[in-house]
Image (cartoon, rainbow, N blue to C red):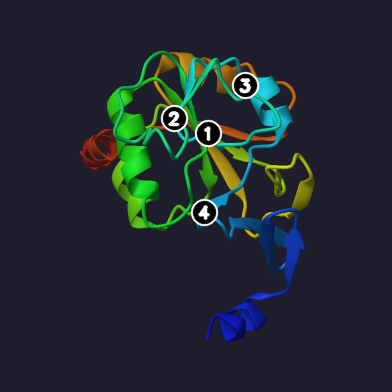
Amino acid sequence: MKKLIRKIAGDTDSVGSHETTKLGNFQHDRNIEHGKEEWLTPPTIIDTFGPFDLDPCAPVKRPWATATNHFTIEDDGLARPWHGLVWCNPPYGSKTGDWLAKCAAHGNCLVLVFARTDTKWFQNHVWPHATSLFFIAGRLSFFHSSGEQGGTAGAPSVLIAFGELADQRLRENQTVAGQYFQNLSSKVIRLRLKNSNK
């Protein structure tokens, strides 16, 4: 059954100790030995928007630092207290909403996720709570834990700022191409629509 799914999804290769499943042009690292999946943030994103105090979902083996402090899957960064300006490129999947809820509650985070504006996690945790958003032009190329660059992502990406410091990093960006939007909560939009009908 797994082979059939891989055949439908795309090619499967091996990179070091990792099996790589190619979805379109995007390769997704899957560590067979530990059963975990990791897509590493392009270092230019970290260099442009950092420095950060904490990365609560950092890879166990990382070719570059993403923050001063790191929590890995072994530390369970979702359950631990966070501090300072947090960088979060969460695991993409069923727990994305949990990570975004924690980012919104912490209120001092910059998050990188796919721009899936139709999803429940985007509707529940981003639109009502984010300070601003930066939709990246084109599609990113994520990296393997070896430091090797993978293919182009299968979807566009967005940076989400929770809090003023993260928002400042997005506003001051002059390196990464894309569109910056200040977010207005759904309540503010409803009030404005209501007032405009008077």
Quarter of the image with the C terminus is top left
Residue 36 screen position, x and y as percent: 51, 53
Q: Tell which circle, 1 or 4, labels the residue nearer the N-terminal end.
A: 4
Q: Which residue is denoted by mark 2 in the rendering?
A: 56
Q: CA distance from mark 2 to mark 1?
A: 6 Å
Residue 29 at least partly seen: yes
Residue 105 vs residue 187, the one in the foreground: 105
* SS at badge 3: helix
Q: Amino acid at mark 1?
A: Ala
At x 39%, y 20%, the residue is 108
At x 68%, y 22%, the residue is 48
Q: Which residue is denoted by mark 4 in the rendering?
A: 34
Disc 4 or disc 3, which is closer to the eye?
4
Is 124 drawn above or below residue 183 in the view shown? below
Q: Which mark is residue 49?
A: 3
Crowd band around label 2 with a 10 angstrom C-alpha radius: few (<14), some (14–19), many (20+): many
Disc 1 or disc 4, which is closer to the eye?
4
Q: Amino acid at mark 3?
A: Phe
Q: Tell which circle, 3 or 1, labels the residue nearer the N-terminal end.
A: 3
Residue 85 vs residue 68, the one in the foreground: 68
